Amino acid sequence: MSHPATTILGALGCALAVLLAGCGAAHDAAPAAAEPAEAAAICQVRVAAIVEDALEVALPAAGTVAVAAPGIRVAAAPADCRVRAVLVAPGQVLAAGTTLVELEPGVEVLAQQVEAVAVQTAARRDLAQAQARLAAQLATRLELGQAQAALELAEVRVAAAAQRVAAVSALTCATACQVTRVAAQAGQQVPAGTVLVEMAIAGHLEVRLGLDPQQARAIAPGQRVLLRPARSPETPPLELTVAALAGQLTPETRLRDAVVAIPDGAGLVAGEYLTAELPLRAARALVVPRAALVQGDDGFAVFTVHDGKAARHVVTIAAETQSLAALAGAGLAVGNDVVVEGAAELTDGMAVAIVAADGRGADAKAGAEDKDAKDAKADKDAKDDKDAKDAKDDKDAKDPAK
């Protein structure tokens, strides 16, 4: 029978051994747990090579179609009148002699004609009386001459009033033109001189595109322009050229206008708002996908990858398109790998792993390439062996001694 003290000491020794064994296991497991954490700190990224190119960028602009001063024509009311019918609409192209509006004489014009006829009737009566009195020796020849002169003046006024009434019937265009504005409405009463229709002579429509003065320095007459109506931006653009550049800034906008002549048949009308793009080719520079740009407190930057580490470069953007950016920055060169996916997660000096286009890591890709190379070499060796054996068999078959 064992002593109680001995039993207690044995139990304590077993417990201590278990505790020490547990600590050792935990100590051994610690590096293993640290390894996944260290692996997780490596950021997987996708890259693209930096190239040198000259981007074609589109300089945006906008303007309104207008009529150049030499091409403006108007049709105005010849006298007080009423608009009976409007026969044209803005944008309509007209041949010479086309009727624009139909008119009716106004109250004042008709009243002038009635008054002129009444004066003429009275003058005729006075002349007849003067002739009768002269025959009865009750009037002089001077009085007869005055009556004749009064009748002649009355007849001139009647003729003029008739002409005014006849003129207030219709307005026509004298030359081929395009209607730019219609100010008349059927039933409207208008005084003499009121402009009812505005027109542009063929070849005199233009659009003035407001450009920033700095950007305008890159533009010259002959520059290609793509125009689209703002109301239908999806339509194919109208490709024209800049005819001239304004010699001074527009006071209201402080912009410099580029003048573009609108050809006949373009389907545009005065007052229509257009958007424009002026394609410009920038100077050659380093070009990267726009996805590579990361914005920070110090401006835009990109990350390149060298020896498995990310390097941050602050850049200056020279030109941009929807998918590319031309830039300059210290430490950048043609052929560098620039991060295009995962850059937002990076910091300078962070460890990275490049992911291939098919989603495999660079190591896996290299391994696959090595396997492909080995397979290709094995295939070549097998083919060479087969060719050598076939050649030997042919030689043996031709040699009778064998």
Image (cartoon, rainbow, N blue to C red):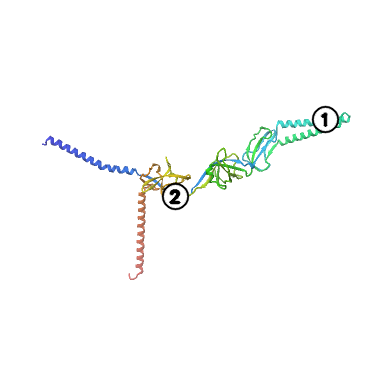
Alpha carbons under labels 1 and 2: distance apart = 103 Å
Q: Residue 199, can we see it?
A: yes
Disc 2 element: strand
Which residue is situated farthest in the bottom direction here?
Answer: 401
**Quick one: quadrant of the C terminus?**
bottom left
Q: Amino acid at mark 2?
A: Val
* Foreground of the two, 52 or 18: 52
Name the residue: 64% across, 38% down: 198
Quarter holding residue 386 = bottom left
Callout 2: 10 Å neighbours few (<14), some, many (20+)?
Answer: some
* Foreground of the two, 146 or 256: 256
Name the residue: 84% across, 33% down: 145
Quarter holding residue 187 = top right
Whole-percent x and y of residue 75? 67, 38
Name the residue: 36% across, 59% down: 380
Callout 1: 10 Å neighbours few (<14), some, many (20+)?
Answer: some
Quarter holding residue 28 = top left
Whole-percent x and y of residue 86? 65, 36
| Eye-nearest disc, 1 or 2 | 2
Disc 1 element: helix
* Foreground of the two, 343 or 402: 343
Name the residue: 74% across, 36% down: 163
Q: Residue 229, can we see it?
A: no
Residue 64 marker: none
Question: In this rendering, would 153 be left or right of 307?
Answer: right
**Quick one: quadrant of the N terminus?**
top left
Sequence order check, earlier mark of 1 and 2: 2
Q: Amino acid at mark 1?
A: Asp
Dot 1 corresponds to which residue? 126
Dot 2 corresponds to which residue? 51
Which residue is situated farthest in the front direction here?
Answer: 248
Question: In this rendering, would 51 be left or right of 172?
Answer: left
